[in-house]
Amino acid sequence: MLMNALSAPWPWYVAGPLIGLTVPLLLLLGNRHFGISSSLRHICAACLPAKIPFFSYNWKKESWNLFFVAGILLGGTIAAFHLTDPLPVVIHPQLAAELQGYGVTDHHALLPVQLFNWQALLTIRGFILMVVGGFLVGFGTRYAGGCTSGHAIMGLSNLQWPSLVATCCFMAGGFIMANLILPFILHL
Amino acid sequence: MNTDFEVQSLDTPVKQEPGWYQLKYLVAGVFFGIILVKSQVVSWYRIQEMFRLQSFHMYGVIGSAVVTGMISVFLIKRLKIRTIHGEPVTFTNKTFNKGQVFGGLLFGFGWAMTGACPGPLFAQIGAGFTVTVVTLFSAIVGTWVYGAVRERLPH
């Protein structure tokens, strides 16, 4: 019974508050500010600082962040392999119809496996989605000074108006890409 | 001009903790990762539905997370709650710069393309989508390139 409830997709009113509680959890565990994209910066500072001032700081003092993201990876494994949802992902019929137009019809996983797989990396479409998209995530979050966690959740929780500006721009960028540009990429 | 307000240990003195204390954050991350996957926040489909206004799910998740976070921060400040080690909890204010607009838009583009923000990238890899390693690596390269060219970007 409990396992069934845990294995089915969790509704927003369960997941949202739990995600929100990560803010006080990290604050009370050790005065740490919730933010995930910083981990990418610490990885740069640790692996290839190249005397760039932006990466010249003692990343070891921020290593909690790397443990946190390692935990996220492990949590993803536990959720996917021990709390497995037996049913395919439910998607909006309009989205399914649109994706069918691009030849994307397999919706058994959380990601469309026809778009995101190792062979697809060698296609223009897959390269743009994964490599260019990933680059924009890393470049954009650092330029903005945070991502969904640092700005939209931690920043807004602390009533920081620059975080509200950033969050609105995340959403605006997403709307522009998903509705105006992505259709052309998916047609490639 | 310094617009770098992100490294907490540079802004506020952070007490050095014994190494094994880091396990706290590993465990916190495990919980967070499970929530991300089980709520399908890591799903490319849920992100597409959000940006096409086809589903309330992501708005509900982010909205209720923000409200919960706001109440928590308010209570921690008002009641001067300390950490489990008795240290005071501190907050840093963010300063506006144009990066939040330009960078925000660029990240929004990437978010809609990959269907993932940085947290879900790690969770997707854990959930068995091995090709996300490439997306994550590309995000690290993007971060590095930003660090290398940031002096020449408008802030």
Image (spheres, rainbow, N blue to C red):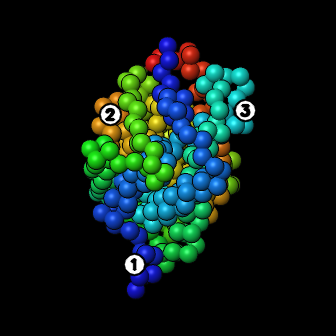
Query: What kind of residue is marked 3?
Result: Leu
Query: What kind of residue is marked 2?
Result: Gln
Would residue B104 be found to the left or right of residue B7 on screen? left
User: Residue at point 60% right, 41% down?
Assistant: B16
User: Residue at point 30% right, 53% down?
Assistant: B68
| Residue A148 visible | no
Q: Residues within 10 Å of mark 3 (few under 14, many from 20)?
A: few
Q: Are marks 3 and 1 in contact (CB under 8 Å)?
A: no
Q: Residues within 10 Å of mark 1 (few under 14, many from 20)?
A: few
Q: Are marks 1 and 2 on the same chain?
A: yes
User: Label 2: which residue?
Assistant: A160
Q: Where is residue B122 drawn, in percent x and y?
A: 58, 53
Nearer to the camera, A65 or A129 = A65
User: Label 1: which residue?
Assistant: A5
Residue A48: image tag: 3
Q: Where is residue A24 drawn, in percent x and y?
A: 39, 51
Q: Quadrant of residue B26?
A: bottom right
**Chain of residue at mark 2:** A
Would residue B46 be found to the left or right of residue B124 on screen? left
Q: Where is residue A20 drawn, in percent x and y?
A: 36, 53
Q: Earlier in the sequence, mark 3 or mark 1?
A: 1
Nearer to the camera, B154 or A129 = B154
**Chain of residue at mark 3:** A
User: In the figure, A109 relative to B130: above or below?
Assistant: below
Q: Are marks 3 and 1 on the same chain?
A: yes
